[in-house]
Image: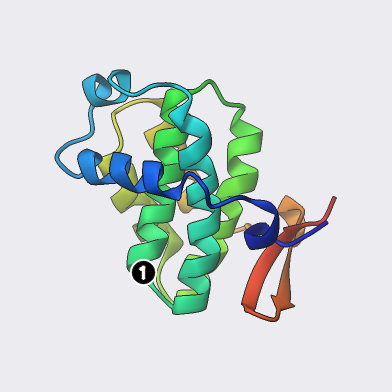
Amino acid sequence: MRPNLERIPAKQDRLAEAILARAARGMDQRFVSSLDPSASLALGHYGVRLATLALRQNSLDLLRRSLLATGLAACLEPYDDRDLMVGLALPWIVAQQLGVSPATVFATVSDSLPDGPVAELFKTFGARTDVTLEAFAWELVTTGSGPDFRPRY
């Protein structure tokens, strides 16, 4: 399987960025309800792509944006906890690679999300100590552009 930045299109990144810019003014359930559920895909793709870019650029800000986009995507559409956690493994690993506490980064982003199950899952997942790429079926690969992640299956 191809690495994330190759296989996940960037064509809706601008939509995700515009939504996150609006979210900066306050994200509550009313804000989430104002969004078209179809934006979930754009936000989800953006979140995964930004995790890789955060690693490449050694950027805590990009990592936070990655998590915020992923969390907002999960607030918009029903999700399976296990599937969400597979995706959250990447920013967890990136936080660790950046030398910051995954628990702290996830808790900070969780506080920005609307109260509810997604915010709680972020806090719980961020506090885990057993997250590895292998356990969540990912691998770190080197591409001509830099490091990237690839699903193992």
Task: Decide: is 9 above or below 38.
Answer: below
Q: Of helix, strand and loop, which one carries label 1? A: helix
**Residue at image mark 1:** 60
Of residue 102 and residue 5, the one placed in the foreground of this image is 5
Q: Quadrant of residue 115?
A: top left
| Amino acid beneath label 1 | Leu
Task: Decide: is 43 above or below 144.
Answer: above
Disc 1: CA contacts within 10 A as few (<14), some (14-19) or many (>=20)? some
Horizontal and vertical percent position of residue 77: 50, 23
Horizontal and vertical percent position of residue 107: 34, 50
Q: Where does the N terminus fall, quadrant-wise? A: bottom right
Horizontal and vertical percent position of residue 16: 39, 43
- The residue sitting at 41% across, 66% down in the picture is 101
Of residue 98 and residue 18, the one placed in the foreground of this image is 18
- The residue sitting at 42% across, 39% down in the picture is 71
Task: Decide: is 18 above or below 2.
Answer: above
In the displayed image of the protein, which residue is found farthest to the left? Answer: 25
Number of numbered markers: 1
